Image (cartoon, grey):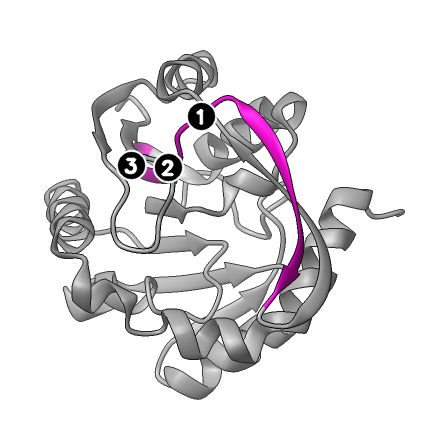
Amino acid sequence: MTESPFLHATRVAYDRIAADYAEKFSVELRDKPLDRALLTAFAELVRSGGAGPVADVGCGPGHVTAQPHALGLDVLGVDLSPEMLAQARRAYPELRFDEGSMTGLDLADGTLGGVTALYSTIHIPTERLPDVFAEFRRVLAPGGYLLLAFQVGDELRLRTEAFGHAISLQYHLRPPDRVAELLGAAGLPVLARLVREPGEGETVPRAYLLARRPG
């Protein structure tokens, strides 16, 4: 089967910058107490719902994957980029990391207690988001939770350079209300939303949406 051009471009870009990306972002949560608090709340909700396994989709170098694991959850990291996965496996050899795409997860229906997708859906074309959200719903067990994070705006941007490497990487800034509407249409009604102002080194606000597959 021919791979979608956006998936190919995303994989190539992150393969190229994986080592530098991991070096820069591997400890970023240390200086983001709000992000850690949201992941802690997510983990508590998953535990209260039966503590099914969690998939961190678009896991990159694994630093987010490690947080729910440290909070006692069974966690799997999934990413398109083999080089990113190599960084994750090197940093967290005790965790499982699989190559895969959020457009078609290699997971059985209704097997997960939770899904995290922090800044990974930004590379999905808007017309494909309903399919991705339907895939998240498919793999979540009834009552399972989704924690989504993304940059706030309403535009498509193209990044052509990162860490001194030439890349071609499209990413979307999206209005939280529109993303929440798409989640609801996919059967994942939003329970909570938070928008914060840009932090150090950031230029646009960040949105966090907590959704749940109805039980």
Do the residues under discs 3 and 2 have CB atoms within 8 angstroms? no
Q: Is residue 181 left or right of residue 67?
A: right
Would you say 39 lies left or right of 149 here?
Answer: left
Where residue 91 sits, quadrant-wise, is bottom left
**Residue 210: image location, x then y, percent:** 26, 31
Which region of the structure is painted magenta? 142-162
Q: Secondary structure at mark 2?
A: loop
Residue 40: percent from left, percent from top:
13, 53
Q: Neighbour class for label 1 at 10 Å: few (<14), some, many (≥20)?
A: some
**Does the residue at mark 1 contact the one at mark 2 (Cβ under 8 Å)?**
yes
Report the residue marked by disc 3. 144
| Residue at x 44%, y 31% (from the top left corner) | 137
Between discs 1 and 2, the one toward the N terminus: 1
Magenta-span inclusion, residue 149: yes
Q: Secondary structure at mark 1?
A: loop
Amino acid type of the residue tagged 2 in the rendering? Val
Closer to the camera in the image, 64 or 143: 64
Quarter of the figure with residue 126: top right
The quadrant of the picture occupied by the C terminus is top left
Residue 112 percent location from the top left of the image = 36, 46
Which residue is depicted at the point 72% across and 60% down?
167
Asked if residue 109 is among those painted magenta in the image, a careful observer would answer no
Q: Is residue 72 visible?
A: no
Q: Is residue 37 above or below residue 178?
A: below
Q: In the visual, does 169 lie left or right of 21?
A: right
Say which residue label 2 marks: 204
Q: Dot 2, how many residues are within 10 Å of its Cα: few (below 14), some (14-19), or many (20+)?
A: some
Q: Which mark is residue 153?
A: 1
Q: Classify 198 as above or below 153.
A: below
Magenta region, mostly helix, strand or loop? Answer: strand
Q: Which mark is nearer the camera, 3 or 1?
A: 1
